[in-house]
Image (spheres, rainbow, N blue to C red):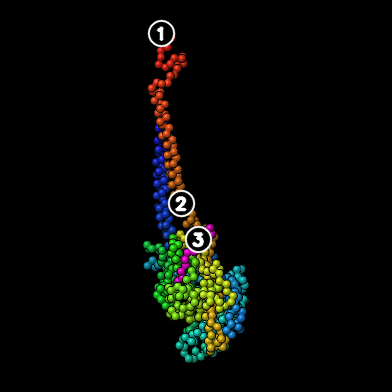
Amino acid sequence: MGKTTGCFTCLLVVGVVLAVVGAVMFPVVQYLIHSEVVQQTMLENGTMGYDLWQDPPADVSMQFWVWNLTNPAEVKKGKKPFLVQRGPYTYREYMPKQNITPNNNGTVSYVTEKSYVLDLNNSIGDPLKDRFTTINIPLMTFAHKITVMDLPGFLKTLLLDLLRIEDAFPSHTVHEMIWGYPDALVKLAYDNGLAPFPEFGVFVNRNNSNDGVFNVYSGVNQENTDKINHITRWKGQSELSFWSTEESNMINGTDGSYNQPFFDKKKPLYVFSSDICRSIIAVYEKETSVRDMPTWRYVGPPEAFANATAYPPNVGFCTPNASYCLPSGLLNVSNCQFGAPIVMSLPHFLYCDPKEVIDLVNGLTPNKEEHQTFFDVEPMTGGPLNVAKRLQINVVIQPYENIPDISKVAKFFLPIIWLNESAHITVDGANELKSNVETPILLTTIGKWSVLGFGGLLVILSIIVLTALWIQKPQDSQVDNSINDGDISTATPNGNPIGERSQLIP
């Protein structure tokens, strides 16, 4: 019994030690996991994060829907426009980061070279053949410029003559409207330094090009890793110049392709978009799943494009000052679009003011699930696994009495094209992320729980056995005492009690 008690006492000690080790492993392992993830998400050649950031393993697409104006003759007379949506016209998008240069101040510089390849299998038709009717954007642009710019007399006269003979509502192929087509007005303006390109298109000169040099925090040798991939400069500038307040001109957040590790649901996500020349806020909405990996969905809230009355911090996006605020849901980007009367919104005027925007045109059906922007982010690494960036390009329509075709039009905002730039992590990319992050974390989690559990099991088993031995010990002691006192009479083989002399022995 003594050996049994000693054995289980040793097991109890071993169990307590294992349980303590298992408990201590929790904060230690958590710290090691946090440190390793941070190291692997830094933008330094050779890390997992660098590979994901430099050339994301995702299927990226750019889809366009065009708005066909079905009643241009009536619109010229001041009637409400009737629109019919056509799309999507899909392009495969490739966007590797190039000219990557680490800097001494803890930042890295790069450009994102974007190229687009037509994907007819996922398109409703052929953009080279399909045509649609909409407003003549160059005509509206230069009709506006003539009224607000101090142009030389000969140039103003020449532009006005061209405007009077231009068709206000021409038809173009989808390809022409997106990627560009020759236009006499644009060519004249280009020759006189009033336009950046000799052709017009909403994505003219965007294929096989980049949108400028970005400088971002790399996280290398920095105590604050919350700013990994946060933009410090764009095109050499640390702030913008398009808006009317210092806050609005701040470049906040990342470019949306990569985020800092260890997200906090309570904190918003900021993304800078060069398409609209400003940063946009996104807030946590719900838990999601991408390729069997848990993710958090962040969405652009309604106040992102709300006007200053509904959301006062947006007053800086009223240009040139607060008296020029547009209705909620619209963003005037003419300052960063070479003076064109371009207004951005979400598709179908989602979150726009119904009375002042949506009700002035026919054919729109805003829907949150189809038209909002969202990011599904893996919270530990910050990797965006599923993204949909959605925008709509609109033109401000208003009458100009010197131009016959548009002298009687009503005032409204006309949708031209809306787009969805989406990215979804590939199966191989998801498997690699799992093997680099989720699998090691799972194994270490199993390990620490196993040590704690096995130690606890030994403690419980040892306590049970030792308790049973302790309860049994008093009974054994009573038996031993009875034997020692001689109370038990035991006969010898010849029938005599032990301790008595036999009568047969002399």
Real-space Cα separation, disc 2 to disc 3, in angstroms = 22 Å
Residue at the spot 41% in from the left edge and 63% down from the top edge: 226
Q: Callout 1: few (<14), some (14-19), or many (20+) C-alpha neighbours within 10 Å?
A: few
Residue 429 in the image, given as x and y percentages of width and height: 52, 60
Q: Which residue is mark 1?
A: 506
Residue span colored magenta: 276-292
Number of numbered markers: 3
Magenta span main SS: strand
Q: Which residue is mark 3?
A: 287
Q: Which mark is residue 354?
A: none
Residue 4 in the image, given as x and y percentages of width and height: 42, 34
Real-space Cα separation, disc 3 to disc 1, in angstroms = 103 Å
Residue 473 in the image, given as x and y percentages of width and height: 41, 31
Identify the element where label 2 is drawn: helix
Residue at the spot 45% in from the left edge and 71% down from the top edge: 279
Residue at the spot 53% in from the left edge and 83% down from the top edge: 398
Amino acid beneath label 1 = Pro
Q: Which residue is mark 2?
A: 445
Amino acid beneath label 2 = Thr
